[in-house]
Image (cartoon, grey):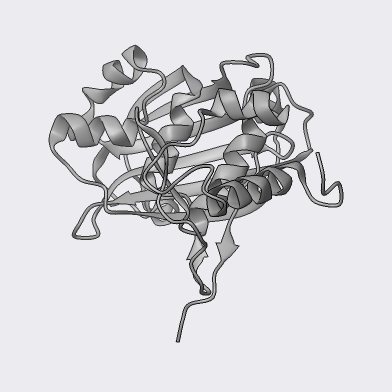
Amino acid sequence: MEGMGDTRYAVVAKDLIAAIAEGRYPVGTLLPTELELCELYDVSRHTVRAAITQLQTQGLVSRRKRVGTRVEASSPRGGYSQSLATVADLAHLAETQVRDIQDVRHFVMDIAEARRLGLVPGEHYFCVSSVRVDQQNALAPLCWTDVYAQQAYAEVIELARQQPGELIASLIEQHFSRHIDVVDQQVRAVLLSPAMAKSLKAEAGTPGLKILRQYRDDEGEVMVVSETIHPDDRFTLVTQMKRERA
């Protein structure tokens, strides 16, 4: 592959951008699947996903569950706008992973935890704690995730066991006729505790990435909160600034 000064996903992204501009992948058609792109470029699925995210943030493609990656434009949009993963992106990512539930607890939210998570103190909630692994590499868990939701949605716990590749937030949407309009995301660096490192088969005290996501409905109410910790070598969060036209 050319462009050895670039990261591998950037090289793949550049080649796909050129292919779209040249009409090899016309607007309205689907790109090859992730596995096909892995074979084509001889890279991992992680690299392919990062490359596709680059295209998506430029407005070139969109991704839909059980449909694929559709070409939306032949040239990038202009602009400066900060782009993060869409709800569809999060659901798409979850499909490639398997949830292994470690614990479920039911509790009344205290003030300190409510403030940290953006939830309501004194309300009844449940928390599903799980390890997520890539189906191609079960020996290196991708993350530990705690998902918080109101007790009224507790029946999704069994659904989460039955559908390990589905986001719990998506299950709540499907079974309670709710709609996730926006996801607020906070990211910070952490050090893996001994217990967390053991669960993730990593070394205690090494860097990790903690991501807090608040899933909000059309009125801004928080429906679900997830708190995820990734070992630093198993996840890359890609954002991009785009210049907006005057």
Asked if residue 114 lies left or right of residue 78, the reply is left
Between 214 and 199, the one lying in front of the other is 214
User: Total marks drawn?
Assistant: 0
Q: Residue furthest left?
A: 177
Q: Residue furthest right?
A: 5
Q: Quadrant of the N terminus?
A: top right
Q: Residue at coordinates 44% horizontally, 25% vertically from top-left?
A: 95
Q: Quadrant of residue 220?
A: bottom left
Q: Quadrant of the C terminus?
A: bottom left
Asked if residue 235 lies left or right of residue 126, the reply is right
Image coordinates of residue 185 in percent, x first then y, are 47, 54
Vertical arrangement, residue 33 with respect to residue 119, above or below: above
Image coordinates of residue 214 in percent, x first then y, are 38, 50
Q: Residue at coordinates 20% horizontally, 57% vertically from top-left?
A: 218
Image coordinates of residue 87 in percent, x first then y, are 37, 45
Q: Residue at coordinates 24% horizontally, 44% vertically from top-left?
A: 123
Image coordinates of residue 159 in percent, x first then y, are 28, 18
Vertical arrangement, residue 51 with respect to residue 174, above or below: below
Q: Residue furthest bottom?
A: 246
